[in-house]
Image (cartoon, grey):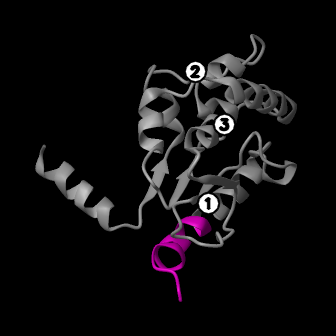
Amino acid sequence: MDRDTRDLLSRLSVGPAFLFLGQASESLDTGGYRLLGQSATDADPVNSPMEIQTLDPQARRMLYATLANVSRESEIPEWLEAVARYPWNGVLTSRIDAEILRAFESDWRRVVPGFGSGRPRHPRNSSELRVWQIYGGVTLPDEEQPPLDSLEFATRKRIAMETMQQLPNGLVTPAS
């Protein structure tokens, strides 16, 4: 085991442990965005998250609905299952699919999905895992769906920054 790995493992054992998981993590096992690819139509092919922004709002809405269905039934990659077994204190992700939420579900932990800067009841409790889908999620309530236009995307980006700014003082070292 190399020095960097030992250092990471020693830091994780002390905690708290928050995982940042980007949209590109969907492509780690296949090299392509398999969930997006399965959700796109011939009329509106989408091969990456950036291409979603080129779609009109109605096409985005349809893509999100299909992505919700596909990601509810998708097979969770082995690497994600392995990462999800760790007792994280929180997960922040730019992924908008439901697979990410399903991956972290377990008998010993309740997943609390959400978007925005809402503070969890017990920010360091690994048995109640808050998963922040910072740009929204396709299976979340209507007001927490991913953005449909550039203005909504800019708003989500601002909220994502606010959420990230809470980490150092509000979540990692919460006030007593």
Residue type for callout 2: Arg
Foreground residue among 156 and 74? 74
Residues rendered magenta in the picture: 162-176
Q: Which residue is drawn at 55% across and 28% down?
A: 76
Mark 1 vs 2: CB contact within 8 A: no
Amino acid carrying label 3: it is Asp
Please determine whether, in this image, residue 49 is positioned above or below residue 125.
above
> Does label 1 or label 2 sit earlier along the sequence?
2
Q: Whole-percent x and y of residue 23?
A: 54, 39
Secondary structure mainly formed by the magenta segment: helix
Indicate which disc, 1 or 3, sits on the residue closer to the N terminus. Answer: 3
Residue located beneath label 1 in the image: 160
Quarter where residue 123 is shown:
bottom right
Give the alpha-carbon distance from disc 3 to disc 2, as whole Å.
11 Å
- Callout 3 crowding tier (Cα within 10 Å): few <14, some 14–19, many ≥20: many
The numbered disc on residue 34 is 2
